[in-house]
Image (cartoon, grey):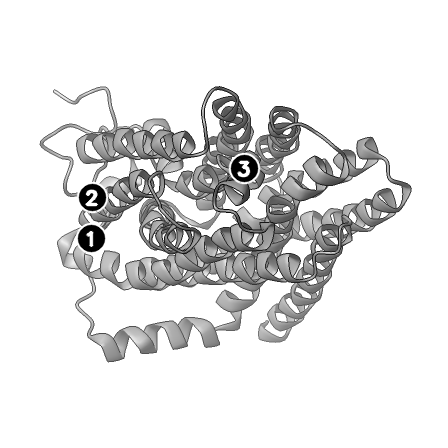
């Protein structure tokens, strides 16, 4: 008898290509699988947003400035980017389950260690390791979806993932702000470690193996490098991937700069900042539902073009709002910018992943490298050009939107030339 969870114990570790044509009939609960993958993919937003309200306290605790503490964000994004390049070939060679479980275990242990970091250098170094290990859920999540669904359905499932993931940036800063009112910043990372433990247990119990042994890639290092080079040189892959990456760059511009902007410039408390951050982040869930609805009648290429246009217009409005000094107008513009991220990123990922040609793990890893590499660069730039105003954040968001728009035009022209 099949269990009511993701999949029965007997069938958990292997899935044949035939089974993928009718997942529900074969005992795979798509909603349950999406929820689990969403929780694993949410490691990144939880590990980022949960401690944002505590950045000023962390700086005071280590007797350092905000720039050094913001560096912990940059190295975390760097770890997420580089780690995915490592995990991509591993999950194509070893399957999805084992590398994921190892990564989640390391993430969990590292989270507990950060709570006891004695110096800012140790804190930053452990954040790098946390990023390197925490990326496992993101790589496996995208690859597993690609294992199971075609391009259009992949885009819809990615939207479901965004909905699940969207809960993290709503809950995390609010929860982090509350924890800081009753305890100190190390408690935030203890909580993160407990979240990792729960996810590790759930993955070990319910996660199916979506890549059969006869479809695994036994490539050596040279062929792995060639796979990455082939994907990077494929315009049908790299252009939509870059569009999605710069859309993410805009999102992480907000994440990196919002703590300073709302707490230091607008004078919000840590708790109020958490609530405001959650309100803006809720736009991700709304955008994901809009994206799913649009995909019923429109092609992914059309939807993400709409998203780019709205994003650029909202980024211009944001910079005008910053000039007025109105908190309400700033939040409204940010809500629109964050709300169209699912329209851009999920469809860009689906279009790019359709070109993976049997290397979904490597393609997923390269997507992650581009997304979080962009995030690391953007957050470092914002930290460097910090000038006691909101313009570094708003300017970075606009810059990312403009670059994404240019890349979209190039992508559409490339597709026309191929026809």
- Residue carrying label 2: 209
| Most foreground residue, 231 or 312 | 312
Q: Give the x, y percent position of residue 298.
A: 62, 44
Q: How far apart are marks 2 and 1 (CA)?
A: 7 Å
**Is 177 rendered above or below residue 381?**
above
Residue at disc 3, secondary structure: helix
- Residue carrying label 3: 57
Q: Give the x, y percent position of residue 334.
A: 72, 40
Mark 1 surroundings: few (<14), some (14-19) or many (≥20) residues within 10 A:
many
**Is 179 rendered above or below residue 153?**
above
Q: Which residue is drawn at 64% across and 51% down?
A: 253
Quadrant where the N terminus is found in the figure: top left
Residue at disc 1, secondary structure: loop
Query: Counting residues from the N terminus, which is met first, the one under dot 3 or under dot 1?
Result: 3
Mark 2 surroundings: few (<14), some (14-19) or many (≥20) residues within 10 A:
some
Q: Distance between the residues labelled 3 and 1?
A: 42 Å
**Circle nearer the viewer, 3 or 1:** 3
Res. 239 image quadrant: bottom right
Quadrant where the C terminus is found in the figure: bottom right
Q: Residue at x 50, y 26 (%)?
A: 180
**Circle nearer the viewer, 2 or 3:** 3
Q: Can residue 354 be seen in this view?
A: no
């Amino acid at each position: 008898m099949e269990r009511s969870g993701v999949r029965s114990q007997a069938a958990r570790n292997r899935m044949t290509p035939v089974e993928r044509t009718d997942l529900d009939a074969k005992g795979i609960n798509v909603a349950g699988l999406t929820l689990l993958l969403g929780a694993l993919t949410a490691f990144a937003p939880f590990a980022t947003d949960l401690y944002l309200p505590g950045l000023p306290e962390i700086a005071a605790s280590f007797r350092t400035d905000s720039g050094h503490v913001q560096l912990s964000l940059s190295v975390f994004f760097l770890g997420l980017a580089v780690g995915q390049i490592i995990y991509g070939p591993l999950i194509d060679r070893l399957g999805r389950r084992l590398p994921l479980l190892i990564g989640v275990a390391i993430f969990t242990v590292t989270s507990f260690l950060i709570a006891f970091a004695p110096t800012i250098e140790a804190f930053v170094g452990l954040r790098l390791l946390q990023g390197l290990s925490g990326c496992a859920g993101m790589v496996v999540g995208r690859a597993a979806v690609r294992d199971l669904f075609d391009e259009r359905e992949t885009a819809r499932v990615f939207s479901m993932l965004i909905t699940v993931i969207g809960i993290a940036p709503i809950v995390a800063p609010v929860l982090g702000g509350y924890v800081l009112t009753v305890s100190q910043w190390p408690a935030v990372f203890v909580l993160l470690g407990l979240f990792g433990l729960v996810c590790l247990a759930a993955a070990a119990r319910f996660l199916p193996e979506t890549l059969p042994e006869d479809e695994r890639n036994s490539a050596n290092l040279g062929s792995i490098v060639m796979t990455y080079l082939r994907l990077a040189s494929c315009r049908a892959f790299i252009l939509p991937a870059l569009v999605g990456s710069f859309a993410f760059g805009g999102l992480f511009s907000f994440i990196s700069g919002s703590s300073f902007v709302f707490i230091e410039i607008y004078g919000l408390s840590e708790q109020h900042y958490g609530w405001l951050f959650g309100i803006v982040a809720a736009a991700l869930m709304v955008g994901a539902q809009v994206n799913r609805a649009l995909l019923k009648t429109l092609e992914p290429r059309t939807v993400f073009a709409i998203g780019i246009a709205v994003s650029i217009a909202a980024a211009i409005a944001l910079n005008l709002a910053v000039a007025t000094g109105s908190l309400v107008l700033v939040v409204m513009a940010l809500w629109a910018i964050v709300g169209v991220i699912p329209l851009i990123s999920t469809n860009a990922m689906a279009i790019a992943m359709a070109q993976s040609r049997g290397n979904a793990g490597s393609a997923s890893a390269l997507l992650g490298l581009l997304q979080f590499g962009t995030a690391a660069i953007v957050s470092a730039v914002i930290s460097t050009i910090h000038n006691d105003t909101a313009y570094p954040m708003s300017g970075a968001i606009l810059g990312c939107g403009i670059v994404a728009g240019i890349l979209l035009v190039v992508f559409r022209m490339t597709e026309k030339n191929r026809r």
